[in-house]
């Protein structure tokens, strides 16, 4: 459910000062370049290729080894934000990001923890149904991290939206006591708030499948704050509020696509149609 959206906002600091930024990796041969999410000048995630016909992707790299929580807003995020502009939370996290246009979205999500290759894994399920397995490796894409699935819905007869929460570090790195504290809090009816920088990548194979929508809209929320909260919500099967800062200039989507997101997130959840 979309709780509230704001107008796009210019946020961030000059790229050299930002802890997190997006980059295209130089390629000596002139071939496809890796699209990267960088944290503290180190590659943290490889993202979908720019071509738009390759499979949707997020793949954890060695630079994803630290959470980006901010102590100054922890008390405010212990409960559900009702307005994305409350108490300067957006500006506080905006100081971690590179200058650009961001669309703030306040969402309620119900995370389900997914282990790659096991039940519910998008990469060995829905993605294989559309693109097949990787022709070089003979295997599905592998994200190198557990992640959370939260929502999916039909965009139209030709496209389907999939939503993911991706932690900067795996849930096994979380402190068990803190996770249990959040589980207890959620079971008493509180929905704390997590914060993420997000991208929307629209990917479609050059030859679409015959058994369902060919375009995959991948809405990926990279957690800045809320690693313990996300695991607790998945454990307790309780909702979590999520402040998403959607990076408009870094998404593989047209302006009309990103403008549709709030309405799509308000639709009923529905699985991908198959023939």
Image (cartoon, rainbow, N blue to C red):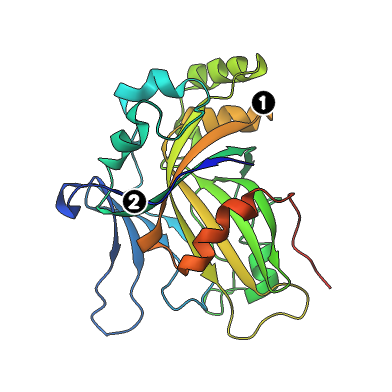
In which quadrant of the rendered image does the C terminus lie?
bottom right
- How many numbered marks are there? 2
**Residue drawn 51% across the image and 60% down it:** 259
Label 1: how many Cα within 10 Å (few below 14, some 14–19, many 20+): some
> Can you say whether 144 is above or below 240 in the image?
below
Q: Are the two marked residues, 1 and 2, in contact with CB atoms closer than 8 angstroms?
A: no
User: At numbered mark 2, what does the secondary structure look like: helix, strand or loop?
Assistant: loop
In the rendering, at what x and y percent does residue 138 appear? 59, 74
**Residue drawn 30% across the image and 37% down it:** 91
Q: Which residue is mark 2?
A: 62
Between marks 1 and 2 in the image, the one whose residue lies nearer the viewer: 1
Q: Closest to the observer: 31 or 224? A: 224
Q: Earlier in the sequence, mark 1 or mark 2?
A: 2
User: At numbered mark 1, what does the secondary structure look like: helix, strand or loop?
Assistant: helix
> Can you say whether 27 is above or below 270 in the image?
below
Position of 89 compared to 188: left or right?
left
Q: Closest to the observer: 249 or 126? A: 249
In the rendering, at what x and y percent does residue 245 appear? 41, 46
The quadrant in which residue 19 appears is: top left
The quadrant in which residue 185 appears is: top right
Q: Going by the picture, which residue comes out furthest to the front?
A: 7
The quadrant in which residue 216 appears is: bottom right
Whole-angstrom CA distance, mark 1 to mark 2, is 30 Å
Label 2: how many Cα within 10 Å (few below 14, some 14–19, many 20+): few
Q: Going by the picture, which residue comes out furthest to the right?
A: 275
In the rendering, at what x and y percent does residue 96 appear? 27, 42
* Camera sees residue 135: yes
> Can you say whether 67 is above or below 43 in the image?
above
> Can you say whether 249 is above or below 158 in the image?
above
Q: Which residue is mark 1?
A: 236
**Residue drawn 73% across the image and 72% down it:** 157
In the rendering, at what x and y percent does residue 137 appear? 53, 73
């Amino acid at each position: 459910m979309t709780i509230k959206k704001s107008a796009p906002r210019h946020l961030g600091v000059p790229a050299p000062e930002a802890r997190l930024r997006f980059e295209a990796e130089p390629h000596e041969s002139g071939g496809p370049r890796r699209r990267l999410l960088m944290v503290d000048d180190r590659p943290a995630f490889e993202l979908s290729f720019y071509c738009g016909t390759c499979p949707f992707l997020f793949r954890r790299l060695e630079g994803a080894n630290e959470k980006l929580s901010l102590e100054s807003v922890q008390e405010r995020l212990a409960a559900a934000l009702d307005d994305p502009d409350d108490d300067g939370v957006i500006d506080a996290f905006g100081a971690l990001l590179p200058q650009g246009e961001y669309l703030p979205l306040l969402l309620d999500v119900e995370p389900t923890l997914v282990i790659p290759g096991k039940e519910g894994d998008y990469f060995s399920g829905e993605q294989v149904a559309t693109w097949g397995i990787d022709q070089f490796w003979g295997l599905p894409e592998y994200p190198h991290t557990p992640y959370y699935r939260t929502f999916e819905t039909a965009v139209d007869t030709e496209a389907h939206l999939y939503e993911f929460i991706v932690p900067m570090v795996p849930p096994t790195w979380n402190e068990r006591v803190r996770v249990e504290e959040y589980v207890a809090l959620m079971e008493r009816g509180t929905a704390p708030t997590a914060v993420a920088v997000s991208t929307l990548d629209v990917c479609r194979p050059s030859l679409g499948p015959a058994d369902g929508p060919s375009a995959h809209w991948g809405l990926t929320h990279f957690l800045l704050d809320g690693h313990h909260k996300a695991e607790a919500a998945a454990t307790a099967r309780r909702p979590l509020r999520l402040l998403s800062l959607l990076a408009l200039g870094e998404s593989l989507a047209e302006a009309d696509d990103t403008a549709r997101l709030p309405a799509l997130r308000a639709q009923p959840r529905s699985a991908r149609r198959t023939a």
